[in-house]
Structure formats: structure tokens, C-alpha cells
Image (tube, rainbow, N blue to C red):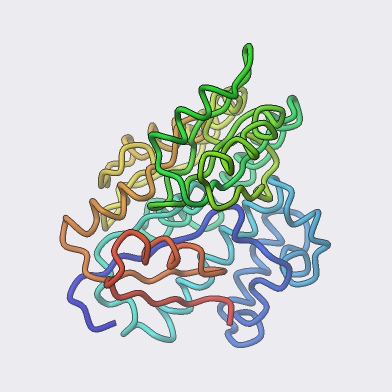
Amino acid sequence: MDVKSAGILFPGQGAQGVGMGRWLCETYTIAKDLFAEAGEVLGYDLADLCQNGPPEKLDATEFCQPALFTVGVAAARVLASEHPERIDNISATAGLSLGEYTAVCFAGGLEFADGLKLVQRRGEAMQSASDAVRSGMASVIGMDLEKLQELCDEVRQGDEVLRPANLLCPGNIAVSGHLTAIERLQPAAVAAGAMKVVPLSVAGAFHTSLMAPAVELLEQALTEIPLRDTRIPVYSNVDAAPHQSADEIRQLLSRQVTQPVMWEASIRRMIADGIEGFLEAGTGRVLRGTLKRIQRKIPTDGFGDQ
């Protein structure tokens, strides 16, 4: 990308797939070594899980989060070591949900091993909260936020939780809540004009109050694991604003699991602040897809799975 100032983006849960990281490990020793280090930290063979599955295990939150974190860091380290010209102009970073931890690591706020332990504990806490109630997420395609919020309010019953949770881009918003409410929302959304409603491969109702039981465990982990001020701004999912203070980032990460992901607002803020192009590092093309819906002409690139 021939731009003066670029942002690097890291995907979150839902981008995973069996085979991720294989090309990086087969092509670059630095990636293979990082996966070996991850296996020692986690106590299981992460490279084998990423490359061979089984998919139901890789999709489980407690395994998926460390896996995506490691693939993202591996891609960034390969770029820094083997293709520095592709990231010399990186001046800001962001990540979608779990990807925000990868962004903080890239920006120098976390050591890899510390970040891996943190996301492992985050994944375990969120999996435990998810196991306590039948809940999940679904992408609603082709509906604006105001109408979707109205529909959530209409179909929700009793003390059910249902809310827009991932505000990805125009026409693509993920809702999160009790499965019973999501099941009622699906036909209602299509009848109201949505193109389709797609269930997501996540364990529970992330970014809602149903994740509250995970917050205390996450806050404890964030207190115990060292965070530093970052060398470049990290745009937070919570407020779509840039942050470099370790104390601010720690507080925002603890709030993130129960708050909506302000992804579209984050990208628009980054562009307003001078970012002229974006690089997606890790697995998949989900984030580049959202970028084209937010700002069609913005230059994009990717590095990770081939």
C-alpha cells in the first residue's frame, strides 16, 4: 500500500478455521517458533489444533481465542522480520473483540506470553459464562441499526437479553443474547427487510450483560498481567477512540466483554485521524470486507493465511 499512514487490524472470534496458521508455519521459521512457544505456555499443541482441528474444539472459546491471538501475532512478527516495508508506515492499530488484545500486543503493550495467558483466561471466563445460559450471536445482513434495535425490543420477552452487539459496518450488524430471542428475531428480521440472518460460531452472548460473570475474572487477570503504555494508538472497541495509556487500556479491556463493539465507528475515527489505508493481519478477510462497506475506496491489504 502506497500510503503515508496505515492502520493494522486484527480479526476476532468467528474468523477461525481449521488450517489457519499452516502457511505461516510452513513458510516462516519465526511463525513456527512462536507456535512452539504458545504450546509451552498453554500446555497443548496449538499448531496441531489450528492446522488439523477438530473444528468443534477450535471453535470453543477457550481454545479459539488463544489460537486467533497467536496467528495474528505470528503474521505481524513475520511482517516485521521478513517484510518490514509493508508495515513501516503503520501508525495505529485496532482489533475486533479478541483481536484488540492482538492489537495491544502489536503496539507493545503486552509481551506475547503474557498476552497469551491473558486471552486464555479471558476465553475460559467467557466460555464459563456462556455455559451457564443458552445464548449466542447472529449477523443480520441488510438492516440499519435503528430498525434492528426496534426489532430486538419487539421480540425480546421477559428478562431475555437481545441487543445489537457488533456494529461492524453498514448493513452488517451482529446481535447477541438468549438463543430463544435470536430464534424469534430471525424470521422477524427477514420479514422486516433484512437479506438474511446468519448464526455465528461463538459460544455465547458476547458483548452483553450475560458476560458479566466473566468480568471479575478478567479484571483479576488484567491486574496480574503486566501492561505497558503502547508505542502507537490502539483504537478501543468500547469508545472508538485512540488510547496509549496502560491504565486506560486495562479498564477498557475489562469493559469490552459486556459492551457493544464499535467497529464501524472505530474505522471512521481512524480515517478521520489520518489513516489512509489498512492491513489485515492474521486469518481470513472479514475485516477487509467491513472496510469496503465503510469506505469503499480505502486501500486495503492482508497478510496471514494464503
Q: Residue at x 49, y 47 (%)?
A: 97
Which image quarter: residue 143? top left
Q: Residue at x 45, y 27 (%)?
A: 150
Quadrant of image for the N terminus: bottom left
Which image quarter: residue 52? bottom right
Quadrant of image for the C terminus: bottom right
- Place of residue 115 in the rendered image (x, y in percent of width and height, measured from the top left): 52, 51
- Place of residue 54 in the rendered image (x, y in percent of width and height, measured from the top left): 83, 62
* Residue in front for this viewpoint, 168 or 104: 168
* Residue in front for this viewpoint, 32 or 198: 198
Q: Residue at x 42, y 60 (%)?
A: 290
- Place of residue 152 in the rendered image (x, y in percent of width and height, measured from the top left): 53, 28
- Place of residue 82 in the rendered image (x, y in percent of width and height, measured from the top left): 44, 86
Q: Residue furthest top?
A: 158
Left or right of 158: which side holds 92?
Answer: left
Which image quarter: residue 186? top right
Q: Residue at x 58, y 35 (%)?
A: 176
* Residue in front for this viewpoint, 125 or 158: 158
In the image, residue 264 above or below residue 250: below
Q: How many marks?
A: 0
Left or right of 123: which side holds 275?
Answer: left
Left or right of 49: which side holds 218?
Answer: left
In the image, residue 142 above or below residue 151: below
